[in-house]
Image (spheres, helix red, strand yellow):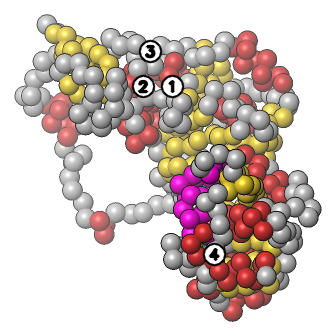
């Protein structure tokens, strides 16, 4: 007879405790333990004939030299942006997790992609949040009302498994993972244990039946996908669909990919008829620049393998309070504070009594160290109230001693700046090479922040 086992598991790190704890001793998170109950059946360890037959040759070690490495097959979608983020297309039998804020456009993106694939492949769209009628209304708005895609509004994983066995689809979309219910578990829908078990079942379906599964997940207030962190380790690919609610642009960002490069991005624009691709993001971020304005600098940032030109704006003004205020949007606050200190110490800018407001325009978030030089020049431009030439752009990391350090993929950055129409680009001296002179743009090597300030503002 089965007995019921009760335990408590931390939602943040998966730590298991026999009793409830207010604070997790493993990760230190408060009020994250939830109760789990499951039936435990005693199983025999005796080797039966069926077990012996199944295990023969299945767990034998093989030499690495004898393993044949075959390039995985790819299925191309109509979206070149999605293909880039996935590393060249969809890998059959993979499990892809797409996370994002509610209402950002995850379901719209999947409906558009699957609506096109349904013309060649069998697609099953499982919805736990919307009825078939609601999905039909959205499909009509996206001009996909005549698609042969199969809809299945259900949250019970037993029924979903049966439906997959009957239909035998090539693609399955689960919208969303937090609404799915594993009946064998005695826990709330959307809990860490439910999300983990449902994901494990979907992984089994994907690998054993070679069915590509796309899982949609919501994110928490902290920006992480709701559910246990182990969820991201279980899947093959993790994509984040991000965007500012005040902007129409959306960015699909790859943070994990077993079949391609991470940190790749794809850009989309949300319109009434759905999501459309943005093939030239640099032009989008720069087309609204105000001429003859101070406190603006352009940086060539690298997102994955894709160079993107973005505008960094800074406003430096005397403080009206006892201490200077610093505010950032789309930039790392601690990094900006460090650069302000370097400019004051190494560039002789009196910033300790100045409020500083910095932003990366267009709703994009820039994180890489190569944007340091552009941030510093934008701050100096606002401080001196002198304009930076609109045809200048910057690339370089700044150290604490004021030196400009080398960055990677410099030739791709210089080529992108020349393609957009910039005349000069400031780069680290240690990145300088003769090949950069042939890109059709003047390349100026910089060794320190003080040298850059002297060239631009003296």
**Magenta residues, as a range?**
324-343
Q: Which comes before the other along the chain, label 1 or label 3?
A: 1
Q: Mark 4, mark 1: which one is toward the viewer?
A: 4
Residue at the far right: name it.
291
Query: In front: 127, or 349?
Result: 349
Instruction: Tell me how far mark 4 sits from mark 3, CA to CA.
Output: 57 Å
Labelled pair 4, 3 in contact (Cβ < 8 Å): no
* Mark 4 Cα shell of 10 Å, populated few (<14), some (14-19), many (≥20): many
Please state the horizontal and vertical placement of residue 16, each as a whole percent of the image: 23, 28
Residue corresponding to mark 3: 189
Res 287 → quadrant:
bottom right
The dot on residue 347 is: 4
Residue corresponding to mark 2: 195
Please state the horizontal and vertical placement of residue 41, each as a whole percent of the image: 17, 16
* Mark 3 Cα shell of 10 Å, populated few (<14), some (14-19), many (≥20): some
Instruction: Tell me how far mark 4 sits from mark 1, CA to CA.
Output: 52 Å
Labelled pair 2, 1 in contact (Cβ < 8 Å): yes
Q: Is residue 442 left or right of residue 171?
A: right
Q: Which comes before the other along the chain, label 2 or label 3?
A: 3
Q: Mark 4, mark 3: which one is toward the viewer?
A: 4
Instruction: Tell me how far mark 1 sits from mark 3, CA to CA.
Output: 10 Å
Quarter of the C terminus within the rendering: bottom right
- Residue 281 appears in the rendering: no
Residue corresponding to mark 1: 177
Q: Which comes before the other along the chain, label 2 or label 4?
A: 2
Does the segment drawn in magenta span residue 332?
Answer: yes
Instruction: Tell me how far mark 2 sits from mark 3, CA to CA.
Output: 8 Å
Q: Residue at x 59, y 49 (%)?
A: 323
| Disc 3, SS | loop
* Mark 1 Cα shell of 10 Å, populated few (<14), some (14-19), many (≥20): many
Query: In front: 144, or 167?
Result: 144
């Amino acid at each position: 007879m089965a007995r019921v086992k009760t335990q408590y598991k931390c939602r943040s790190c998966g730590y298991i405790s026999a009793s409830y704890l207010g604070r997790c001793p493993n990760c230190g998170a408060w009020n994250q333990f939830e109760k789990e109950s499951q039936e435990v059946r005693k199983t025999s360890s005796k080797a039966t004939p069926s077990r012996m037959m199944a295990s023969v040759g299945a767990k034998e070690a093989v030499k690495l030299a004898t393993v044949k490495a075959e390039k995985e097959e790819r299925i191309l979608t109509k979206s070149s942006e999605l293909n880039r983020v996935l590393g060249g297309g969809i890998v059959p039998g993979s499990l892809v997790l797409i996370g994002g804020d509610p209402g950002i456009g995850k379901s719209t993106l999947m409906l558009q992609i699957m609506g096109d694939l349904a013309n060649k492949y069998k697609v099953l769209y499982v919805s736990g949040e919307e009825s078939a009628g609601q999905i039909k209304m959205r499909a009509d708005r996206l001009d996909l009302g005549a698609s042969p895609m199969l809809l299945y509004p259900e949250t019970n994983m037993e029924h979903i498994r049966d439906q997959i066995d009957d239909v035998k689809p090539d693609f399955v979309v689960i919208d969303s993972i937090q609404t799915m219910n594993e009946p064998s578990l005695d826990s709330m829908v959307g809990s860490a244990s439910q999300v983990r078990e449902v994901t494990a079942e979907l992984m089994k379906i994907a690998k054993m039946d070679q069915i590509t599964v796309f899982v949609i997940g919501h994110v928490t207030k902290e920006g992480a996908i709701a559910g246990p962190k182990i969820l991201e380790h279980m899947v093959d690919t993790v994509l984040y669909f991000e965007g500012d609610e005040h902007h129409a642009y959306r960015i699909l960002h790859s943070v994990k990919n077993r079949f391609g490069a991470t940190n790749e991005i794809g850009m989309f624009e949300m319109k009434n008829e759905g999501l459309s691709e943005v093939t030239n993001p640099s032009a989008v971020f720069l087309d609204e620049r105000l001429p003859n304005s101070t406190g603006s600098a352009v940086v060539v940032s690298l997102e994955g393998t894709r160079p993107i030109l973005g505008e960094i704006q800074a406003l430096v003004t005397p403080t009206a309070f006892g201490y200077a205020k610093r505010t950032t949007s789309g930039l790392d606050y601690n990094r900006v504070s460090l650069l302000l200190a370097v400019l004051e110490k190494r560039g002789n800018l009196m910033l300790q009594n100045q409020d500083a407001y910095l932003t990366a325009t267009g709703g994009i978030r820039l994180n890489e160290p190569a944007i340091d030089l552009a941030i510093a020049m934008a701050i100096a431009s606002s401080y001196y109230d002198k304009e930076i030439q609109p045809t200048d752009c910057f690339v370089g990391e700044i150290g604490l001693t004021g030196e400009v350090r080398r960055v990677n993929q410099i030739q791709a950055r210089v080529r992108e700046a020349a393609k957009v129409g910039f005349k000069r680009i400031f780069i680290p001296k240690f990145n300088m090479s003769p090949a950069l002179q042939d890109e059709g743009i003047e390349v100026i090597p910089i060794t320190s922040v003080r040298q850059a300030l002297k060239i631009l503002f003296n």
